[in-house]
Image (cartoon, helix red, strand yellow):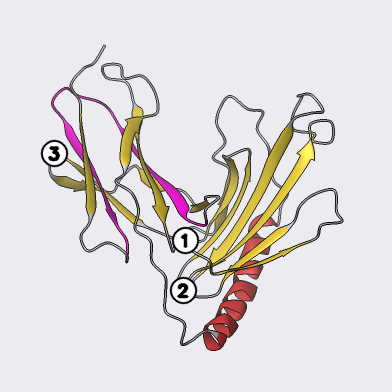
């Protein structure tokens, strides 16, 4: 896959800390992974033999940035740098976890450090070609079982691409849709590629046709997946 990460870790610690810095491309990602037993993890009531993954992702480009914290694959907090606030998009089936005041301000400070490091990496690796991996065809599915007249969420799942991010757009019956759409922070896969999920809030109506279209520098043309409402209860 993509072998352009600088990996640093401390083998003599109980937890595993990993710093990943791509050596080419416009986006720099830093990932901290900590695995602890259930007895040490306050958020869980599982046996001591279970392991949990606490993931922090921080990334930046010249014009954009990402900061996200997750637990076992569920986003707990991310920085909305456009609206200048922290967001806690936690699912309803877990006990809500609130982050302390100043978390967003710390994320903004980290962005400045990230951009400084990115500038240095570009200078060091200015003659190294960018490695590109295209995403797979996106998958579309609903978050909840569809019921007539009830709000639901369409999910467009995109994976296998490098570098991050992808651009995702939605249409309904051939018309572009932006209201009610969102996209999560690029999530690293074990092979070095990334996954992103875009969401669209909607009320299903029989006959409606939706599309999710993905663009990425590694694609010669956009990838589009069609989804239509054919059955309701």
Residue highlighted by disc 2: 26
Q: Left or right: 203 with respect to 173?
A: right
Image coordinates of residue 128 in percent, x first then y, are 47, 82
> Residue shown at 74%/56% (left/top)?
17
Mark count: 3
Q: Name the mark nearer the viewer: 1 or 3.
A: 3
Is residue 201 in view from this perspective? no
Question: Which label was assigned to residue 82?
Answer: 1
- Helix, strand or loop at disc 1? loop
Is residue 62 in view from this perspective? yes
Residue highlighted by disc 3: 173
Residue 199 within the magenta-colored segment of the rendering: yes
Q: CA distance from mark 2 to mark 3?
A: 35 Å
> Residue shown at 22%/64% (left/top)?
220
How many C-alpha atoms fall within 10 Å of the one at disc 2: few (<14), some, or many (≥20)?
some
Q: Are marks 1 and 2 in contact (CB under 8 Å)?
A: no
Q: Are marks 1 and 3 in contact (CB under 8 Å)?
A: no
Image coordinates of residue 118 in percent, x first then y, are 56, 77
- From which residue to which does the magenta span run? 192-217
Question: Which label was assigned to residue 174?
Answer: none
Q: 64 or 55: which is nearer to us? A: 55
- Helix, strand or loop at disc 2? loop
Q: Name the mark nearer the viewer: 1 or 2.
A: 2
Q: CA distance from mark 1 to mark 2?
A: 19 Å
- Viewport quadrant of the C terminus: top left
The tag earlier along the polypeptide, 2 or 3, is 2
């Amino acid at each position: 896959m993509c072998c352009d990460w600088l990996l640093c870790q401390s083998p003599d610690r109980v937890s595993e800390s990993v710093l990943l810095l791509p050596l080419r491309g416009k986006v720099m990602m830093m990932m901290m992974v900590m695995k602890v037993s259930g007895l040490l993890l306050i958020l869980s009531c599982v046996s001591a033999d279970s392991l949990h993954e606490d993931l922090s992702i921080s990334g930046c480009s010249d014009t954009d940035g990402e900061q996200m914290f997750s637990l076992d694959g569920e986003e707990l907090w991310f920085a909305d740098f456009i609206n200048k606030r922290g967001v806690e998009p936690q699912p309803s089936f877990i006990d809500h976890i609130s982050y302390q005041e100043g978390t967003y301000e710390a994320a903004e400070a980290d962005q400045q450090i990230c951009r400084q490091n990115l500038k240095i990496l570009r200078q060091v690796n200015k003659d190294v070609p960018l490695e590109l991996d295209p995403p797979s065809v996106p998958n579309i599915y609903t978050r909840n079982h569809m019921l007539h007249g009830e709000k639901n969420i369409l999910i467009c799942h995109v994976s296998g691409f490098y570098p991050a991010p992808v651009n995702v757009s939605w249409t309904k019956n051939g018309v572009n849709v932006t209201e009610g759409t969102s996209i999560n922070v690029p999530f690293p896969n074990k092979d070095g590629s990334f996954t992103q999920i875009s969401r669209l809030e909607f009320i299903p109506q029989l006959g409606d046709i939706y599309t999710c279209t993905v663009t990425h520098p590694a694609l010669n043309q956009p990838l589009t997946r069609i989804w239509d409402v054919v059955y309701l209860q």
